[in-house]
Image (spheres, grey):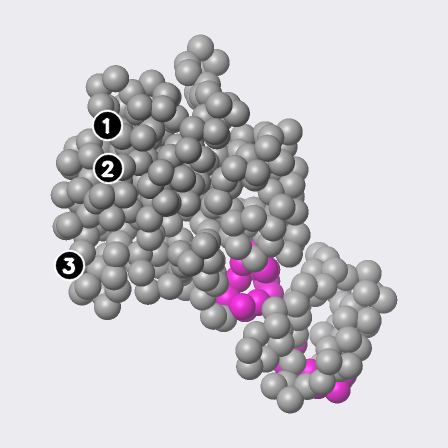
Amino acid sequence: MIIEMHPDSSQAQVKEVEHKARSLKLDVQMNLGTSKTIVALLGDNTGQIDTDLFAVLPGVQSVTRVMKPYKLASREFKQDDTTINIDGLTIGDNRIIVMAGPCAVENKEQLMEAARAIKRAGASVLRGGAFKPRTSPFSFQGLGKDGLELLVQAKDEVGLPIITEVLDTQHVNLVSEYADILQIGARNMQNFNLLTKVGKTLRPALLKRGLSASVTEWMAAADYLLAQNNTQVSLCERGIRTFETSSRFSLDICSIPVVKQNSHLPLIVDPSHAAGHYSLVSSIAKAAVAAGADGLIIEVHPNPKEAMSDGLQALTPSDFARLMEELKPIAASLGRTI
Ligand code: PEP
Ligand code: MN
């Protein structure tokens, strides 16, 4: 249930709503907007609590039952776009944010080369996996803590914030000591304990869409982060499993306007994992920006032929630099910058 308070309502009136909700064993989340306060009441799963119980309270302007399975990620809860601030960099405003770097941190030289190249080309966040979710246990699993240390060295040298995946609840504290943005991978989208633990850190998080998750399931998963009062959540479309085998996954281009219409959270698109092949990445990236994505996350490797993971889908630094140039007029045509 979403309660919109009257713009002139007092703090005492908001408290009264909260008190009533708690007496009915409901959880309460506030969106204290600049012009009005929205109160989300969570936990009325059977829809049996009468909305009039709240509509009659002083200061309440409207009461709406949200029928969607996701609440906090919805535009009903928060109409204005969420923006995320990382040391002066804003995700979710007019500027399209490009995150780039290797699939996995392999060694210092590889990471530094990638970091310098993506910075030169105009990317604003460095990506790199230290803990890797590999399909086979015999594949390279990442450098772990050593990889995190290298990411921080690269961050210090090129001056870009870093995003890296947290695979496991056990590593949340460790990864959040190093990363500016905690990435939750597609395979963990419904690892609810992990989501809750990452939510509790109150650190910026990027939630990738599960391989076979509907948009609704993905938004409901975002609610797990938001329910911990973590407002710094972005979503990432990275392609879903379909019957099509000519690309690694099928990028759901429809999900871009669907998410933007129904959620206030910033949306980043990962064309690399959807494509699975470097020759497809640039076209998909351009389509994603044209469709309204707030940012991109792209795999770039200084020498894709030698990559220890996802080399086939990695762009070379020069292909990445070309893509960055090609994205500019597309962004400009939408009144955005990149
Ligand atoms: C990655 O970003 O390297 C990754 C493993 O992505 P996903 O979780 O989308 O497969
Ligand atoms: Mn990868």
- Quick one: label 1 or label 3, which is nearer the N terminus? 1
Kindly identify which residue carries mark 2: 117
- Quick one: label 3 or label 2, which is nearer the N terminus? 2
Does label 1 point to a residue whose CB lies under 8 Å from ligand 2? no
Kindly identify which residue carries mark 1: 302
Taking the magenta stretch, the answer to whether it contains residue 89 is no
Q: Amino acid at mark 1?
A: Pro
Q: Quadrant of residue 307?
A: top left
* Main secondary-structure element of the magenta-colored stretch: loop
Q: Amino acid at mark 2?
A: Ala
Say if 53 sits above or below 329 in the image.
below
The residue range painted magenta reads 57-78
Say if 41 sits above or below 189 in the image.
below
Quarter that holds the N terminus? bottom right
Say the numbered circle drawn on residue 329: 3
Asked whether 238 or 233 is in front, the reply is 233
Asked whether 114 or 210 is in front, the reply is 114
Q: Are marks 2 and 1 in contact (CB under 8 Å)?
A: yes
Image location of residue 234, percent across then percent down: 46, 51
Query: Element type at marker 1?
Result: loop
Q: Is residue 159 left or right of residue 11?
A: left
Name, please, the residue furthest toward the bottom.
8
